[in-house]
Image (tube, helix red, strand yellow):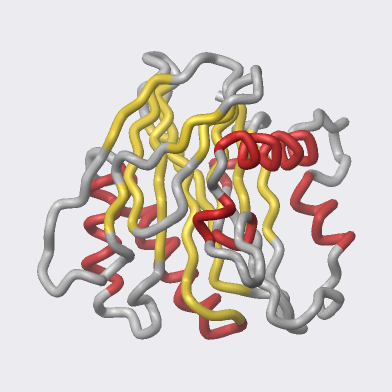
Amino acid sequence: MLHTPDLARHPDVAVRYLPATGALNVCGDWYDAVDLPAGRFTVAVGDVVGHGLMAATVMGRLRSALSAATRTVHGPAQALEVLGLYARSVEGALAATAVQVLVDCHSHLLIYSSAGHPPPVLLHPDGTCDLLDQATDPPLGARPEHVPRPQATTTYTPGDTLILYTDGLIERRGENIDAGLDPPDRHARHLHRFRRGTSRRRPPGAPGPQQRRKRRHRPGRRPPGRDDPTALTGTV
């Protein structure tokens, strides 16, 4: 359902997108990638409250708006500011979350901002990980008045893995969502398993991780009420 032309130019980036339930196989989770000049690109993941066609409709509007804003403003914080203002005029968009990371391949910088979304994770080859949680703000449209969103910058080492995801990847029934992020070593082990499942090299024409995942989980075969796990992972 989600067509992202720029993503096809990044062979080290993989996605798993799995709607919760329903014959339409749609949900409110989304992901996107945008190529920018000077060896830079952005990756983003977002989550609209709810499931089904209504959530997917809102998701499509927010995703397109962020993609357009990313091409015209400077940095993830400003892009999410624009998206937050737009979300106020979209029915069903309030309390939606999103996170965007700009990858600067020349300077090895990650510039990021989050609107109420679980923090991205920078996974290192030695098994340790860092949460990108220094620029977290309320969800889209949550504030009655416009306030500039925070933005943070960190460095990465070539060979690190950047992972963006929705709460469906870490949330468990009867467990606080913070437990999915703590302790850090548990989170790192979980993400290493996920990375191994999405980063294997594949021959030309072979189904990608997203396609393989959809084949294993057909619509209507998951237990009802499960959340939508969506994740984007890339070696930087």
Is 53 rendered above or below residue 117?
below
Tell me residue 7's x, y (percent). 58, 41
Is 154 rendered above or below residue 78?
above
- Residue nearest the observer in this picture, 127 or 113: 127
Q: Tell me the quadrant of the picture where the N terminus can be found.
A: bottom right
Q: Is residue 123 left or right of residue 193?
A: left
Q: Is residue 159 left or right of residue 142?
A: right
Q: Is residue 197 left or right of residue 32?
A: right
- Residue nearest the observer in this picture, 222 or 65: 222
Tell me residue 172's x, y (percent). 65, 64
Is 177 rendered above or below residue 165?
below
- Residue nearest the observer in this picture, 160 or 183: 183
At 40% from the left edge and 46% from the top edge, which residue is drawn? 100
Q: Is residue 147 left or right of residue 31?
A: left
Tell me residue 133's x, y (percent). 37, 42
Tell me residue 26's x, y (percent). 65, 74
At 65% from the left edge and 19% from the top edge, which residue is drawn? 125
